[in-house]
Amino acid sequence: MSKKHKEVTFDPAADTPTVVQETAIEKQNTLNRLSDKVHGLLMNAVSHLRLSLTLRIALHSAGQLLRTTIPVLLTVTIALCALEIPHIRTAQSAVAALEPAQELIYAPEQLLGLSVTEAYLLEENAESADMSFGQQVKLLFSTLGQGEPRCIKVYSETEQGGLVIAYPVTRLLQSLSVMFWVVLCCDFLRVIHLINHRNRLNQKVLKPISDMAETAATLSANNLSDRISVDGAKNELKDLALVINGMLDRIELSYNSQKQFVSDASHELRTPIAVIQGYVSMLERWGKTDKEVLDEGIAAISQEASSMKELVERLLFLARHDKKTLMLEMETFDPLEVMSELHREAKMLSSEHTFELAPAENATISGDKGMIKQLMRVLVDNAIKYTPAGGTITLGMRREAGQCVLSVTDTGGGISPEDLTKVFDRFYRCDDARKSQTSGHGLGLSIARIIAVAHGGRIRVRSKVGTGTTFSVFLPLEERA
């Protein structure tokens, strides 16, 4: 248990100890703790206080309005004072033309009709005829609050010496007082008007914001086509509504593309799975006793499993690209090496086609060598699939305007103009390819374009129905030091 310290003092007169329960420091600490607690409670209450946007705008406008009251009053005061300066100059000139009745003091009879209640000359070598600016200001307001009427004392240099006149400003002060209360009351009434008519502000200005909030609250995957109405919105609010609608357009397009992607992927995976299940069922019935059926089933299952593996790998590649996690192992190499390797591999893959490697000079590019080879392999595989037996496939490489161009040209049936704009879309296969039952998933060219763009390049396709197709990959050349 902690003990409370007590301060013991002795009263010399009574000679008895007096126990002081709390020192001044302890009292101050208690007050500080109480103040912090009250402040914390107030801040917590304010943080949970939620005012409507229209009320906050009205209060802000009212605050801005009240802030202009003091500058307005100050400006008007300066203007009224400036209007009095000619009258003060006239009074000074009129008094300076008179002779003081009593040595240095002007008699009241002399000042009748001059708007001056008092006038006198300063004694030479006493109060100094040459007064500094600070002294003049001090003299100006020295008797402002004394007696009636209220006056200011104005100093000026004359031939007779330093002249001081008392100029009455009661009327000016009354005008300023009336103006102050009028302006303050008008501002107060305008503040009340703003707060009371905040609903009108909501209808005219903030209604589009409410519509945006309501539309955004109802958006879901089932109604992504809904858009914010721009009727009645003006200027920045209309621009905001258009920007949000544009964002919704992009979200809807991306969502539909993703949905189509999942649908197409499911369809492509469903076919090999159905084939595998069919052969498994066949093997369960006859494969145990019929070696020919067993070999056919194993070969078909193996082929479909390879097809599924290829599809899954391509889907994973596209997923990494979409998530911005596709990594490239950059190196500097000669693409002619890649084209030579592909030429050798292609001749072993298909003996029904003629493969040619066009003469090319060496070049240097910077990129992921494995990815570039995968890109070109996609183009070569497509050329093999869609070129009839006996056709020719030519691999080429050339320099063009600071770029290295890798090309694959075939003598197949070509691509129609309608299909040319879609060949790089995911899962897209032209009608001729589907009718010919050519194997593939429609992902190869999408992956090829992704690889080319990732290396700062592009792919161009030229084709003529009945003649053939040429795919050209443009990659930036590596600058030599």
Image: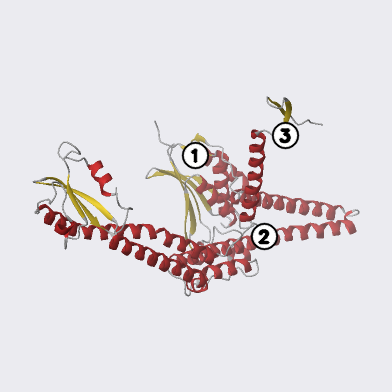
Label 3 residue SS: loop
For marks 3 and 2, give the CA distance: 80 Å
Q: Residues within 10 Å of mark 2 (few under 14, many from 20)?
A: few
**Is 123 placed left or right of 405 in the picture?**
left
Tag 1 residue:
335
Query: What residue type is disc 1 on?
Result: Pro
Query: What residue type is disc 2 on?
Result: Val
Mark 3 against mark 2, which lies toward the viewer? 3
Which mark is first along the chain, 3 or 1? 3
Circle count: 3
Relative to 89, residue 239 above or below: below
Mark 1 against mark 3, which lies toward the viewer? 3
> In front: 74, or 317?
74
At 26% from the left and 49% from the top, the residue drawn is 140
Label 2 residue SS: helix
Tag 2 residue:
262
Tag 3 residue:
21
Q: Is residue 98 visible?
A: yes
Which mark is first along the chain, 2 or 3? 3
Relative to 339, residue 263 above or below: below
Q: Position of residue 42 (x, y in %)?
A: 63, 52
For marks 1 and 3, give the CA distance: 93 Å
Query: What residue type is disc 3 on?
Result: Gln
Q: Position of residue 195 (x, y in %)?
A: 51, 69
